[in-house]
Image (cartoon, rainbow, N blue to C red):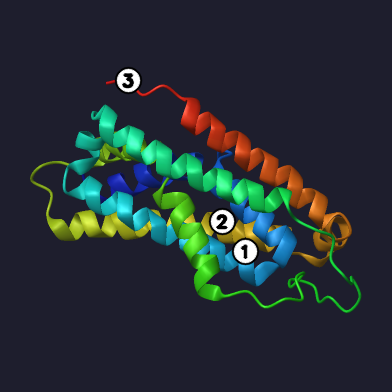
Amino acid sequence: MEMLHGLIVITFVHLLAAASPGPDFVLVTQQTLSHGRRVGLLCSLGIALGLSIHIVYSAFGLAAVIANSAQALWAIKLLGGAYLLYLGIKGLRSRPALSEAGVAAGSVSALPRSAWRTVGAGFLCNALNPKAPIYFVALFTIVLSPAMPLYQIAIYGVWIMLLQLGWFSAVALLLSTPRIQRAFQRGSHWIDRVLGAAMIALGIKVLMTRVSS
């Protein structure tokens, strides 16, 4: 398969996957509405960087091993489900802001947030997604071949990360527009709690999903 054809296929498939509701989408939405554009973009960057884990092990053929190993999938499910529960509980504990005055558009939270912690939260949310190994087995099976040079695999991987970053950055920019921020600002703690409950539901779903050997 020619590289251009492969890039077109990856673009179509991965954008559909990124746009589907899941932990990454919930996290970016919650962080952007609660803390503004900067945090949403940093979280998007972390999610895109988290893809590097899946891309590397897929390129070396480990995705197929993980996808077909009940023990490996179960370990990933435990870690991923527990992390989603942790994020959900943090959302449920959200409290109303002490003051809504003087909050600039695109920066809802008056409290400084560590850029590394925000990027790290996005990274872990994506890297611990138990559905990722199966997804990447399917995706890379479509475009990869044993004879494909390493540089081409690297180009595909970087392109997937750019697609992920572009999509979630667009989500963060949309949700951080002044009109939307003003609409959600007063009830931001309730939004945190609703999205936290959604994250907990996703975590429970991950933990309760049966792993077939």
Check residue 40 in the rendering and tell me which mark sits there, or answer none. Answer: 1
> Can residue 134 be seen in this snapshot?
no
Q: Quadrant of the C terminus?
A: top left
| Residue at the extreme left | 147
Crowding around mark 3 (Cα neighbors within 10 Å: few <14, some 14 to 19, many 20+) is few
Q: Nearer the viewer, residue 179 or 132?
A: 132
Labels 2 and 3: the sequence-earlier one: 2
The alpha-carbon separation of the residues under discs 1 and 2 comes to 8 Å
Label 1 residue SS: helix
Q: Nearer the viewer, residue 167 or 131?
A: 131
* Residue at 20 percent of width and 56 percent of height: 152
Labels 1 and 2: the sequence-earlier one: 1
Question: Residue type at mark 3?
Answer: Ser
Residue 159: x percent and y percent? 36, 57
Q: Image height check: is 160 above or below 45?
A: above
Question: Does the residue at mark 2 contact the one at mark 3 (Cβ under 8 Å)?
Answer: no
The alpha-carbon separation of the residues under discs 2 and 3 comes to 31 Å
Q: Say which of marks 2 and 3 sits in front.
A: 3
Which image quarter: residue 80?
A: top left
Labels 3 and 1: the sequence-earlier one: 1
Residue 194: x percent and y percent? 75, 43
Q: Nearer the viewer, residue 181 or 170?
A: 181
Name the residue that disc number 2 marks: 168
Q: Say which of marks 3 and 1 sits in front.
A: 3
The alpha-carbon separation of the residues under discs 3 and 1 comes to 35 Å
Question: Residue type at mark 1?
Answer: Gly
Name the residue that disc number 3 marks: 212
Please give left or right for residue 57 compared with residue 48 in the image: left
Q: Image height check: is 66 above or below 186?
A: above
Question: Residue type at mark 2?
Answer: Phe
* Residue at 71 percent of width and 67 percent of height: 36
Q: Quadrant of the N terminus?
A: top left
